[in-house]
Image (tube, grey):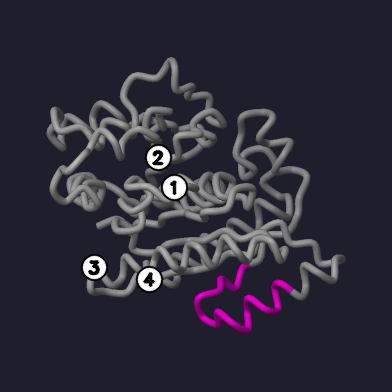
Amino acid sequence: MAAVFAVANQKGGVGKTTTALSLAASLAALGHNVLVIDVDPHASASIHLAYYPEAVTGSALDIFREDLDDAHLWQAIIKQRASHGFDFVPSHTQLSDVEQDLGNRSGKGMILRQRLAHIAPQYDYIVIDCPPQMSVVLVNCLVAADVVLVPMQTDFLALHGLKLLFATLGTLERGLGRPIRVKVLATMFDRRANACNRVLDLLQSKLGPRMCATVINIDTKFREASARGLVITDFAPTSRGALEYLELARELVQMEGA
């Protein structure tokens, strides 16, 4: 069964989509079979890979529909993406309306977890790019995850987003009756800035083993890769950013015992 990583933070601009795609590509580079699911209505990961919501047929929105059984669902929405080494399910802007569409549907927070049970045996890892806003879709992602990976920019303003997410996770844990595993990833780190070093030290002291050992430094290659519609591991495989995400992939694989 695949290990499911939900990449989530309720604050934007922390490298969430970059982390989801770079981690997936790095896991694939290590020889693992990987699926990425974009459930963020902003569709940043999808657009990055040239899957434009207005043109795509079959998307993550279909996961929350009742008229497709599991086998036909995944066959319809998984896009083969051999050039990046992982399969991909694109997003749809109407994912922002799922809360209203589901209404009082029973077990609506468990839909994604139940759907993944059908496809998980085909993969080693499933990486989910989560929506930033609190919603039934985000709840589905957190419930479905084996590990919630929280990218966090190393500045003091980002601490508030972390506080919000931990509050959400605490509520879910009480409802589920089980803990949710969390790993926080420091991103956009500038070792030359005293403020970044103070935030990193604070996170490491407060979070202990919940903090990833890997730190993602600032690297202009991320922006250049995005402009080309590429993942950094393809665009600049020897760059600092690419090597750090490869190290993150190794860290998470070791953590999962794979």
Return the x and y of residue 71 as percentages of the image width and height: 15, 35
Residue mark closest to the camera, 3 vs 1: 3
Q: Is mark 1 on a helix, strand or loop?
A: loop
Callout 3 crowding tier (Cα within 10 Å): few <14, some 14–19, many ≥20: few
Return the x and y of residue 32 as percentages of the image width and height: 40, 52
The residue under label 3 is: 176
Give yes or no for residue 113 being in the magenta stretch.
no
Q: Is residue 88 above or below residue 109?
A: above
Disc 3 to disc 1, how far (Cα)? 19 Å
2 or 1: tag closer to the N-terminus: 2
Residue mark closest to the camera, 3 vs 2: 3
- Residue toward you, 149 or 133: 133
Which labelled disc corresponds to residue 170?
4
Which kind of residue does numbered mark 3 sit on? Leu
Disc 4 to disc 2, how far (Cα)? 22 Å
Disc 3 to disc 2, how far (Cα)? 22 Å
Q: Please report the residue visible at 40 percent of the width from the left and 19 percent of the height from the top.
A: 56
Return the x and y of residue 235 as percentages of the image width and height: 67, 38
Q: In which quarter of the image is residue 193?
A: bottom right
Labelled pair 2, 1 in contact (Cβ < 8 Å): yes
Q: Which residue sits furthest top?
A: 55
Which labelled disc corresponds to residue 130?
1
3 or 1: tag closer to the N-terminus: 1
Q: Is mark 4 on a helix, strand or loop?
A: helix
4 or 1: tag closer to the N-terminus: 1
4 or 2: tag closer to the N-terminus: 2
3 or 2: tag closer to the N-terminus: 2
The residue under label 2 is: 39
Q: Please report the residue visible at 66 percent of the width from the left and 66 percent of the height from the top.
A: 215
Callout 1 crowding tier (Cα within 10 Å): few <14, some 14–19, many ≥20: many
Image-based side of 4 in relation to 111, left or right? right
